[in-house]
Amino acid sequence: MIQPMENAAKIFICNHPSQLFLFKNLSLIIKKYNPDIKVILLKVNHPYFSKFNFEPYKKYFDKIIEFKFIHYKKNFFLSYWEIFNFQKKLKKINNNLLLGFDKIDLFLSDSTWLPVNILLYNLSRQKNIKNITRFNEGQLESSQTKKDNIKALLCNLYTLPFKCYKVKVLTTLGGKFLNFIYVDQMPGIIVRIVNPNAQMLNNIDWEKENILPLTIVSKNSAISKRDMVIVFGDAGLLQDCSEYMPNEETYIKKLTNFFKSIEDKYSDSKLWYKPHPADGQKIMSGINASKYNLFDNSINAEVIFEKYHKRIKAVYTLSSTSVVMGSFFGIPSYTFYRYLCNRAGIDKFDNLFDQENIKSKFLFHISDSSEIGKIDKLKYTIKNIKNLDKVYRKVLNV
């Protein structure tokens, strides 16, 4: 007897270009096991999407629904019509599309930004949403963060006329905004994305944990010569994290010496610079721009690694999490915040980079310029993780 096809869908909420690599690969896995399941992307157009080339990703999703990005504002009346129209569109999509499925599984990053907050609140209450999975990249609170209760109060005024969850506001000890976190227990389960070569996989019965080694579904480049070295920049970091940095003169001098050491170390390689999306084409202090090729913001770190990982010899950054993804690909990946920051700054970034789910021998934190290139000769092998396929199917419900 032929079984009827399941009238089911998988929905991914994507509010930032950096999430597309994960969601694209998960879509491929879903289609591998059940090509009849509809994979729908709710694309919230973060400002970085205006620069990013989204076109290559369209083919991985059966339907793409776009929403405007909306922000928490000091005066929520300024956002009233934006949010009203956002929720009106969501209601229309729910009635015209989503209610047509018997079963929907919802996947999203563990984000607290307002559009994701609204989508999660509303969709989690739909009867045909059967499972919710929130992918988490790490702990936000630490000894180097504090809560801003005034900003949180202003943000939570949004919960009076609109349907969304209450949030807390995290700042640096100096009072600069870092992120939002939810106040209450949220629906669904948390799944931590883990470096497929992370040290923690040796020490835990990981099949019983809510973790998922990042799947890398990409075509291997035929080019095997590693001739690219990439610096992921953040030209605004001195201003944004001034309490963790030396004075400007010392900051520029140390960066100049550091980048000169990189340029000397890799004189036989092609040097590349990828600006932070918030920087436009601005390059960090201390770099000899004439020696670098420039990536623009039509692509992000994930695209670069997927396209060039067989050619990349090493990647460097002061503190961008872009290099974490590089280490996932087995690319020698370096930070140098320990070289530049004061003790408080080192503690702040250690909290971000020393989490168990991303630790691996391919992620190294430089304290002195003599350590440049220290792990370049490491060989990469994906761990033979027992029952990996079973875990992916469990998380994706396929």
Image (tube, grey):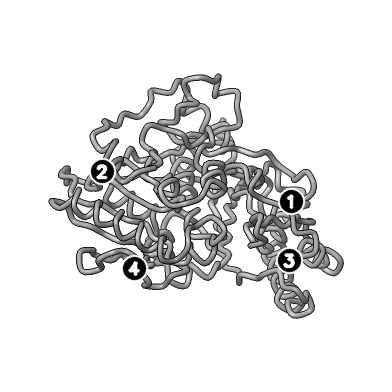
Question: Is disc 3 placed on a helix, strand or loop?
Answer: helix
Real-space CA distance between mark 3 and mark 1, rounded to the nearest whole angstrom? 23 Å
Where, quadrant-wise, is the N terminus in this rendering? top right
The crowd level at tag 3 (other Cα within 10 Å; few <14, some 14-19, many 20+) is some
Earlier along the polypeptide chain: callout 3 or callout 4?
3
Q: Residues within 10 Å of mark 4 (few under 14, many from 20)?
A: some
Q: Looking at the image, which is closer to me, 207 or 147?
A: 147
What's under tag 4, amino acid-wise? Asp
Q: Mark 3 or 1, which is nearer the eye?
A: 1
Residue that carries the numbered disc 2 in the rendered image: 220
Which residue is identified by label 3?
A: 91
Whether residue 9 can be seen here: no
Q: Earlier in the sequence, mark 2 or mark 3?
A: 3
The earlier-in-sequence mark between 4 and 2 is: 2
Q: Nearer the viewer, residue 268 or 344?
A: 344
Residue at mark 4: 296
Secondary structure at badge 1 equals strand
Displayed quadrant of residue 207: top right
